[in-house]
Image: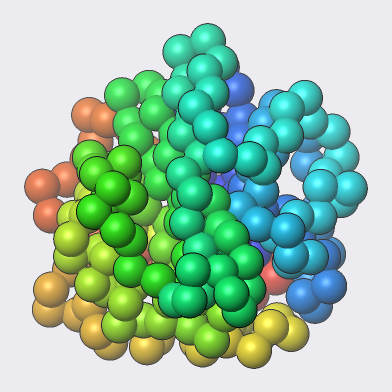
Amino acid sequence: MIIRWIAHSCFQLAFKEKTILTDPFEGIGYEMPDIDTDIVTVSHQHFDHNAVGKVKSYSVLLDRPGHYEYDDMVIDAIPSFHDECCGEKRGSNLIFTVGAEGLKVTHLGDLGHLPSEEQYEAIKGTDVLMVPVGGNYTIDAEKAFEICKTIRPNIIIPMHYRTEGLTVDIEKGYHFEELVKGYFDVAHVHRDEMEIRKDDLKHNTRVVYLANRYVDAD
């Protein structure tokens, strides 16, 4: 699998059989590049996560809770909330898990609270976790760290944090990095993608900051 960070909470996951694009955006200071994909996932209906019209082409849109299977790929869209008040402030959110090629990938979307026992159970066994760390509209760095310690994925990819030119009012990525240093290994990869194979997973949890096409990861 190749994970490519587009920007914000938007990633493209390229498996052998299919590609998935998460949370396409508009109105955040960046433009969505032209991307062809098989599946688009949308965690919630806010403009910086649901700009499906900006996707060049796709076959399947997943924006509702449910269990989905495509060939050897299994996708679960798990209901959660965009805030700590059961959605009263910002509505609902979907956590997506993708199982394929012996890997389990979890994208938390704009999660605004610590997961329930049931939600933790659903994301148990995650190998790669994409977690928002910028706070304000989502969990903050402290809650993100707590979630990571509970899930203990092999690879943690921070997302939804301030980068140069971003117009969303959220914190920079170094707040999360300062918290996890000494607890998890931390690496900055100065490119927008990384390849992950089941056989290459390390024993220690790694926090990996990717770069993107606009700016280096902060």
Camera-side residue of 131 and 185: 131
Indicate left or right for 55 with 160 as reference: right
How many discs mark residues in the rendered view? 0
Answer with the quarter of the image where residue 157 lies: bottom left
Where residue 206 appears, as percent x and y from the top left, is: 24, 59
Residue depicted at x 41% and y 82%: 140
Indicate left or right for 191 with 202 as reference: right
Where residue 81 appears, as percent x and y from the top left, is: 51, 63
Indicate left or right for 110 with 113 as reference: right
Indicate left or right for 146 with 109 as reference: left
Camera-side residue of 46 and 4: 46
Residue depicted at x 31% and y 41%: 122
The correct choice, above or below, for 104 with respect to 179 in the image is above
Camera-side residue of 195 and 95: 95
Residue sticking out furthest to the top: 71
Answer with the quarter of the image where residue 101 lies: top left
Q: How are the colours assigned in the image?
A: rainbow
The correct choice, above or below, for 169 with respect to 160 in the image is below
Where residue 179 appears, as percent x and y from the top left, is: 24, 84
Where residue 91 appears, as percent x and y from the top left, is: 62, 66
State which quarter of the image contains the N terminus.
top left
Residue 10 appears in the rendering: no
Residue depicted at x 46% and y 13%: 72
The correct choice, above or below, for 191 with respect to 59 in the image is below
Residue 196 appears in the rendering: yes
